[in-house]
Image: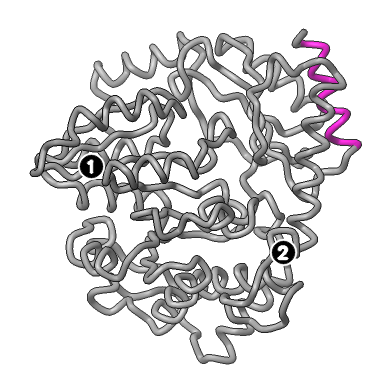
Amino acid sequence: MKSLPNKLNTKLQDRRANDAFRQLDTPKDLVDFSSNDYLGFSKSEAIFDKAHQYLIENNLKQNGATGSRLLSGNHKLYNEVESEIAKTHNCEAALIFNSGYDANIGFFSSIPQRNDVILYDELCHASIRDGIKMSNAKSFKFKHNDFQDLKKQILRFALNDNCDLYVVTESVFSMDGDSPDLVALSKLCKTQDANLIIDEAHAVGVFGYGLVQKHKIETDVFARIITFGKALGCHGAAILGSQRLKDYLVNFSRSFIYTTALPPHTLATIKTAYSELSVMSNTSTALSTSFSETSHPQIERLSDNINFFKKEIKRVGLQNEFIQSDSAIHCCIIPNNESVKSVASTLQDHGYDVKPILSPTVPKGKERLRFCVHSYNSKEEISEVLTLLTTFVA
């Protein structure tokens, strides 16, 4: 077999030299503080069984979609689930993509046009930044959650009639776990006639149907990206917005057009997971049933665990090492790849699955342990892992 070119070998060697080399590990039976399965839905036998039964009852015994949605892959579940998702999230239309990465690539590579301007938070996810790189629009980052900096940049372009402005942020940032003031941001964008795009990947399920709905700013947001692979425990993503936005994406979004569609089983699982969120308030299987963000026992337990985790951070005296967060993501800064990997390895040796986040994924000097809190973590586990952490971080 032909060997790897020298310049690629050099890049791999540099990764090893900087303690940043990535490799695939086999999952271990450890206490989970690393996965995005915030509510435990990915392991829910009830969701699995209900999704399977739905397929049987509706004669959808099909392993694959057979093609892209514009050819042979648009099976009947797609229209049904998209309609129900749109109703659930208080928007005109939803368009399902194969993943959150595909959704962000598809949106940002096709929506902003030449001479348009994209202003994005400097800590936006790689999928957003990769999509922006594929766009013909100009792009500029603004300081993290700094709306004064954002406003200055908006004013640079506000008087250009040939320029549509797009402002991009996340409702919960995946590497810090913090959130912007979405109400203030929506007012700023409305005042300046900028199109606001919010990625809700780590908010949906953790905060009910997302922070956009919690703050009741749905009508002020141009587009929302939601994903099903985090708290909903399944797979795929959707872009929420107007019917015209959906029509445009169907016609011009390449990551939607040129890929095989998701199979019926995935759509049935998405449908069932949404139904599970509202099961406490209504026994209907429709996604559009009424929902209170504290109505589901897993969400209540998750919220309780998040609050307990924050209290334990203070109890053990680590509040200065952790980034402030009200979400399920809590990060302890431990500079230097070698150091953070060593602490993570020791925690894993003691039975706790906590992952290190290394540079260049995060800026050099901002390496961290990323704790993901779940509804199924016990308070004893939370106390023990943070107490153990104090022996390495002080």
**In magenta stretch: residue 388:** yes
User: Which stretch is magenta?
Assistant: 380-392
Hey, what amino acid is under mark 1? Leu
x and y percentages locating residue 175 in the rendered image: 54, 31
What residue is disc 2 on? 44
Quarter holding residue 339: top right
How many numbered discs, if any? 2
Residue lying at the far front of the rendered structure? 191
Up-down: is 375 above or below 15? below
- 160 falls in the magenta region: no
Left or right, 175 with reference to 261: right
Q: Residue at x 34, y 43 (%)?
A: 189
Secondary structure state at the residue bearing disc 1: strand
Above or below residue 325? Residue 282 is below
Residue where numbered disc 1 is placed = 165
Report the residue at 75% width, 63% height from top. 296
